[in-house]
Amino acid sequence: MHRRSRRTADSQLDRRSFLAAAGAVTTAAGLGLTVGMDSRPAAATPGDPTPTAATPAQETPAAEAAPTNAGTTLVSVAAPRGSGGYRRLGEGPGWSRVVRADLAEGRSGREDRRTALACFVQFTDLHLTDVQHPLRYEFFRSADAGGWRPHEALTLPGVVSLVERVNKLRRGPATGKPLGFMVTTGDNGDENARIEVEWFLTALSGGRMNPNTGDPRHYEGVQNSGLKLYWHPDTALRDQDKAVGYPRIDGYLAAACRGVTSPGLNIPWYSTFGNHDGLSGGCYPAAGTFISDVAVGNKKLQYIPPAEAKYLIEGEVNGADPKGKRIEAMLKAHKKDMRTVTPDPRRVPLTARQYVAAHLDPRYTGRGPVGHGYTRANLDSGNLYYTFRVSDRVIGISLDSTDPGGHYQGSLGTAQFNWLDRTLAQHKDEYALVFSHHPSWSMSNMTPDPARPGEKRHNGDEVLALLGRHPNVLAWINGHSHRNRIRPRGTFWEIATASHVDYPQLARVIEITDNKDGTISLFTTLVESAAPYRTDFHDLSQTGLAALYRELAFNAPGSDTSLAGSPTDRNTELLLTRR
């Protein structure tokens, strides 16, 4: 589930808002993943918060580097051309940097005094999608135009183009410090399917990906269903997307099913867990339920009446159906209306341990570290939270904010909540960055964890209060809402970044400096993928598809046009007082 409407992803009733955020914990048998030997220093694990990193970064005087804005949104941003229902994109003016003194005043001369403590990249909400999966929720589009993304078949070329951008960037635009690592903040895949996890790991570590699941000879998704509800790029069908200007592109589906090659990131990277990584469609637990059987089965539902779709959306958005009972009843009621498709065992949903095992597979080590933050201790415990070394004075803390009981909003269990408190206390003499999928305003899910039914869940306000008790916290960095939003939190900043599936398809570079005057600066700079702004409907190369991915996303019916946020949520200098 993964689409968004013009309403926000925070509180409104709409499928795209919900879809941008949904998920569930699942069980799969016979995964057959090989766990390789971990050759790095023993990384911190739940219960052992001593952090490590592939190569700890050292402080560097900012004046010794060569900062440049090239390749960032400080220079240019995709912008629409012309008018009408479907608009082409071209190069537009960049977004300037805004100094935010909400928590501390900037002192003159800090540019010459400061030293860079850390420089890294945040990816979030990639939503790499198997568009032929039998249990997708495209049929919600009958009640909400934003219930399905016309561009989602191109997530693989899209993420590779983002990897290419980071590889070209190399240094932070504010300090010139080399990029130390990349960290995702969840929703790396979309359906909690093994194949999507493998795509994610391959895209970031390097290798060849085949987006064509099921029948290797034919596409079997909604875009050749004959239903006017969906964009049919290869035919003359007057579907509802073509009615608002979407083009006919002969050969599009064949091109979208071709193999995609990624160079992999040229820096180490770390992985954080999101609700779409752990829950079917971002919402429903699959272990021991009908969901696992449907996922690897041969029946796909493509349409339900609008009233039914609205009823199901209401249940999901309001948290009334965390176990997916309404979905189960609906699928059984529409059994005769389903399309027969080719089953594929690679669509099996993964448990938390299997998700960790995939990260530990030596095929996906790339530039490291082995496990990308996860260790054998995580594999043994099933806990998906850990610490890692950001630089010699900064630790990173990656949380698991997904509620395994179901529903797309997040929370923390007491064991993890207390571990976070202890970890911050044990590292009180170092700066700390906290990473999670959910932002504070989307952590309201009190559904019990089936594995720990008596354990209390803790909401966003409680997490904010905990972080506020630790003066070493500089920032809480997250995603989930698919929206750029930066908020002062008393003694630290909360930084939420837009997704790379919904327009404007961004990632964020974050640099930290000690200004040597009692203040710290956090520089945030947004970047787009390396794909050209202009598209050519005849260019169906991997690069051409990546450009088309952006343009189709911009034009997606029901899309939220405010996800880029205000100027104060984009390229910033965020000041803090620290002694």
Image (spheres, rainbow, N blue to C red):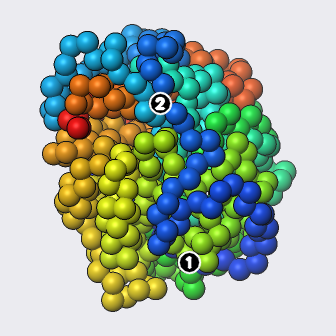
Q: Quadrant of residue 169?
A: top right
Residue 84, image x and y in percent? 39, 19
Residue 35, image x and y in percent? 76, 67
The image shows residue 128, relative to residue 84, as above or below, that is below
The image shows residue 454, relative to residue 376, as above or below, that is below
Q: Quadrant of residue 296?
A: bottom right
Amino acid on which the number 1 mark rests in the picture: Ser
* Circles 2, 1 touching at the beta carbon (< 8 Å): no
Amino acid on which the number 2 mark rests in the picture: Glu
Residue 3, image x and y in percent? 43, 49
Q: Which mark is residue 59?
A: 2
Q: Nearer the viewer, residue 513 or 224?
A: 513
Q: Nearer the viewer, residue 309 or 508?
A: 508
Mark closer to the chain start, 2 or 1: 2
Q: Residue at x 23, y 38 (%)?
A: 579
- Hey, which residue is sitting farthest right in the picture? 217
Comparing labels 2 and 1, the label whose residue is closer to the camera: 2
Q: How many labels were placed on the picture?
A: 2
Q: CA distance from mark 2 to mark 1?
A: 35 Å
Residue 327, image x and y in percent? 45, 74
For the question of whether residue 204 can be seen, the reply is: yes
The image shows residue 98, relative to residue 518, as above or below, that is above
Q: Which mark is residue 381?
A: 1
Quick check: 297 left or right of 227? Answer: right
